[in-house]
Amino acid sequence: MTELNTPIVTDIDRPILVPPGGHKKVLLHSCCAPCSGEVMEAMLASGIDYTIYFYNPNIHPHKEYMLRKEENMRFADKFGIPFVDKDDDYENDRKEWFAKAKGMEFEPERGIRCTMCFDMRFEKAAQYAHENGFHVFTSSLGISRWKDMKQINGCGHRAAKPYDDLVYWDFNWRKGGGSARMIEISKREHFYQQEYCGCAYSLRDSNAHRKSQGRIPIKLGVLYYGDESTQYEPQAENKIIVEK
């Protein structure tokens, strides 16, 4: 069972979460600290014993990848949460990601390239869960209102299907104030704020959009939640609709 190094905020009215099958051990695929912060605290508040699984070879360039991973590791360490870094072969995994994306370079966000990206990451997470005694896995990706939750859940269930002892937990982390708490936690923790989804094509398209508005290109590593200039959105190009 996870032993907390730091107490979580207890004055938040969160529902008690029960993973599928009543299992208390969950593998959490995490994409970044801002998206996983509320998911992590919500599971801790429900007494769920979980491990973070970080496998995101889509994130480009390497500087951005390290910024996101290190923020996630920092927050996990604060609570004493086990952190599995499976991007140990990042360069080869990144090459594989680009190979899989070939022919999809100009697909829109939420399109088939994103499905490929989720599939690749979730397949690795499901395999790790199966091999390490987890019967449930989930992801922080679905908390972002910029993502298509149906698309993400479909990829999650598909990844779990080959394993009889594994299910994907498709809980809606946005509801019950989850979207708002995601921003509150990010501000409280002064998380690094990414301004695009993560891949090279998302960065390209975000910069093209900024250029069309007469804005400067994205600068990596300069925007943090809590700064006066921060817009408090996971991707600054897109408006969040907070779900209550």
Image (tube, grey):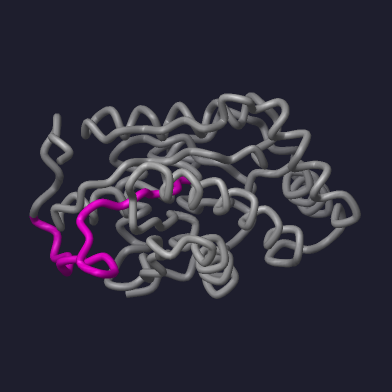
**Relative height, residue 152 to residue 60 (above, below):** below
Quarter-of-image position of residue 57: top right
Q: Which residue corresponds to the image point at 47% horizontal and 61% vertical from the top-left?
A: 163
Task: Determine if the magenta segment contains residue 10.
Answer: no
In percent of width and height, residue 35 lies at: 43, 50
Quarter-of-image position of residue 24: bottom left
Q: Main secondary structure of the magenta part?
A: loop
Q: Residue furthest right?
A: 103
Q: Residue furthest front?
A: 164
Q: Which residue corresponds to the image point at 28% horizontal and 28% vertical from the top-left?
A: 77
Task: Determine if the magenta segment contains residue 16.
Answer: yes
Quarter-of-image position of residue 42: bottom left
Q: Which residue corresponds to the image point at 50% horizontal and 48% vertical from the top-left?
A: 127
Magenta range is: 11-30
Q: Is residue 129 or residue 42 the one in the foreground?
A: 129
Q: Which residue corresponds to the image point at 61% horizontal and 56% vertical from the top-left?
A: 118
Tell whether 188 sits left or right of 229: left
In percent of width and height, residue 180 lies at: 34, 61
In percent of width and height, residue 122 lies at: 55, 53
Q: Is residue 53 or residue 159 the one in the foreground?
A: 159
In percent of width and height, residue 228 lies at: 44, 39
Q: How many marks?
A: 0
Q: Is residue 182 or residue 208 the one in the foreground?
A: 182
